[in-house]
């Protein structure tokens, strides 16, 4: 009755391969309202990839009790003085938490609670971040090379991008005098 099986997916060289693996690419043109400096945005190549997400979805979206796994690669770059970053989201199922961990490169995990308090944690290879429920999360690449981070979240978490599209994060991460700072 026992059998030896091949794993569902393989995570090597920062890429995930296997069944139920999907890959989403976010180009600059998909992120029009994310960045502050509209003028700088207009003058950039909108076809360039800002980040891609490689994820393993072993169960259907919204399945209670399941887990999803993802690897996100954010390319280095800035729009004006704002670092390339993910859209960021709350979970639709607000109470659900998530783990992020740094794999390659350097960045910052920006979090915001429901009272709009904002804080950030440095990301680097080996950094481990627990994102509690009811906390919005976004990652910026503050380095000169690719930032790769991995994530694990409940399959019934869902992504709420609308709240961020409507009210934004209360603070943004920009480069000032060569260092990343959070500004209002
Ligand atoms: C991580 C996870 C994913 C998320 C991705 C990109 O891999 O949190 O659920 O989709 O980062 O972030 P966003 O969806 O905010 O663009
Ligand atoms: Zn999430």
Image (cartoon, grey):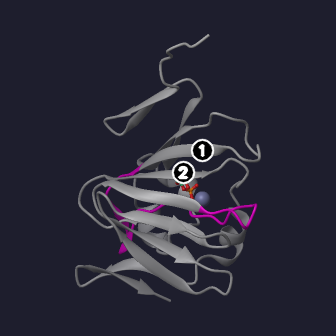
Visible residue check, residue 171? no
Residue wearing tag 1 = 68
Ligand 1 is found in which quarter of the picture? bottom right
- What range of the chain is rendered magenta? 73-97
The correct choice, above or below, for 103 with respect to 166 in the image is above
Residue under the point 63% across and 85% down? 116
Is 88 a magenta residue? yes
Secondary structure under tag 2 reads strand
Residue shown at the point (72%, 47%) measured from the top left: 65
Judged by its main secondary structure, the magenta piece is: loop
Q: Which residue is mark 2?
A: 152
Q: Is residue 31 above or below residue 61?
A: below
Residue located 66% across and 66% down the image = 90
Near mark 2 (Cα within 10 A), the count class, few <14, some 14-19 or many ≥20, is some
The residue nearer to you, when weighing 179 against 101, is: 101
Locate residue 158 relative to residue 152 in the image: left or right. right
> Would you say the beta carbon of the disc 1 residue lies within 8 angstroms of ligand 1?
yes
**Residue shown at the point (62%, 10%) measured from the top left:** 1
**Which badge, 1 or 2, is on the more N-terminal residue?**
1
Q: Position of residue 37 (x, y in %)?
A: 46, 74
- Identify which residue, 20 or 8, lies in the foreground: 8
Query: Quick check: marks 1 and 2 in contact, CB under 8 Å?
Result: yes
Asked which quadrant contains residue 132, the reply is bottom right
Q: Residue furthest top?
A: 1
Q: Secondary structure at mark 1?
A: strand
Q: Which mark is residue 134?
A: none
């Amino acid at each position: 009755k026992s059998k030896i099986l091949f794993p569902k997916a393989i995570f090597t060289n920062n890429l995930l391969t296997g069944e139920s693996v999907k890959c989403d690419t976010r180009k600059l043109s998909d992120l029009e309202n994310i960045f502050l400096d509209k003028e700088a945005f207009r003058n950039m190549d909108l076809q360039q990839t800002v980040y891609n997400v490689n994820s393993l979805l072993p169960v259907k979206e919204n399945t209670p009790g399941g887990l999803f796994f993802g690897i996100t690669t954010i390319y280095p770059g800035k729009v004006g003085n704002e670092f390339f970053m993910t859209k960021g989201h709350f979970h639709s199922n607000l109470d659900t938490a998530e783990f992020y961990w740094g794999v390659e490169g350097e960045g910052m995990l920006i979090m915001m609670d429901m009272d709009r308090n904002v804080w950030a944690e440095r990301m680097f290879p080996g950094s481990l971040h627990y994102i509690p429920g009811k906390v919005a999360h976004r990652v910026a690449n503050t380095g000169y090379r690719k930032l790769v981070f991995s994530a694990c979240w409940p399959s019934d978490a869902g992504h709420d991008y609308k709240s961020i599209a409507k009210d934004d994060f209360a603070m943004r991460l920009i480069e000032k005098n060569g260092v990343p700072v959070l500004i209002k």
